[in-house]
Image (cartoon, rainbow, N blue to C red):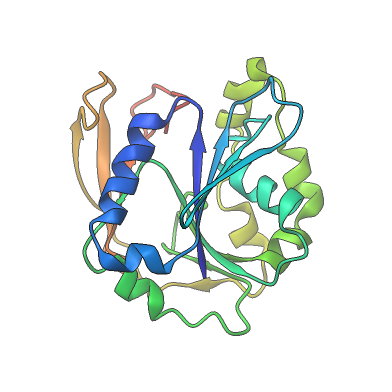
Amino acid sequence: MKIVINSHINGTIALDHLLESMKLYKEFNEYEIIIIIGGYYKNNDYEIKKVDNLTYIYCNHNSIDFTGLIALLDLYHDAKDHYFYLHDSCKIGSRFYEKLKKIDTNNVSSIKINKNFSMNIGIYSQEIINNFYDFLLSKKNIDESKCMDFKINSNEDHIFKNDPNNLLLENYNNWIYYGPVDYYKTGTMRIVEYYPNLDLYKIKANWGQGNWTLNN
């Protein structure tokens, strides 16, 4: 399984924080990690850079939560892989890799991490990504002025909800969190949600307080 991080040109603080947490553990080097960064509108096409086990993909679109899935559709459609897909505004704990390794992806198309809402975070096969070709292309945003519209009309968990074979990663439907706090010291208040089934933290700005931002 590969790890895919969905990010944005303005998400450097969050991305660095996530990567720092991932590099704390020796298992980091065992994974191919694909970092997909949206918002490079001036690029003619995808630009790709590889550094050790990291592949950076710079996208000429910003499709919010779907940026990474669209890039996988465009660039990896012939692959037979499974991906653990998460956002840059996350942090992993010491047991994350251990828990990830235990997930059996045989005959699996997608797995969500929470019974009620997963924020598109979870496991996807390349096959299920390809199957949602039309939907994902409808979410491909190349117009910076339309970003907020795409954010508000996010279709969260659309693939999970419409994949008849979708699975739930353990029966986890609790909401463990603390905050709000200015987690990144940027002036934006966030709550920190914890998912014990993966030892994963999600640092979340858009949590129902009424103020939407583009950096979730």
Q: Residue at x 38, y 24 (%)?
A: 210
User: Is residue 167 left or right of 146 when viewed as pictured?
Assistant: left
Nearer to me, 18 or 211: 18
User: Is residue 10 left or right of 197 when viewed as pictured?
Assistant: right
Depicted 60 relative to depicted 48: above or below: above
Where residue 13 sits in the image (x, y, percent)?
33, 31
Where residue 165 sits in the image (x, y, percent)?
64, 75
Q: Quadrant of the C terminus?
A: top left
Where residue 20 sits in the image (x, y, percent)?
28, 47
User: Is residue 57 left or right of 70 when viewed as pictured?
Assistant: left
Q: Quadrant of residue 145?
A: top right
Q: Quadrant of residue 94?
A: bottom left
Residue 155 seen: no
Nearer to me, 131 or 163: 131
User: Is residue 8 left or right of 140 when viewed as pictured?
Assistant: left
Depicted 175 relative to depicted 10: above or below: below
Depicted 104 relative to depicted 198: above or below: below
Residue 37 seen: yes
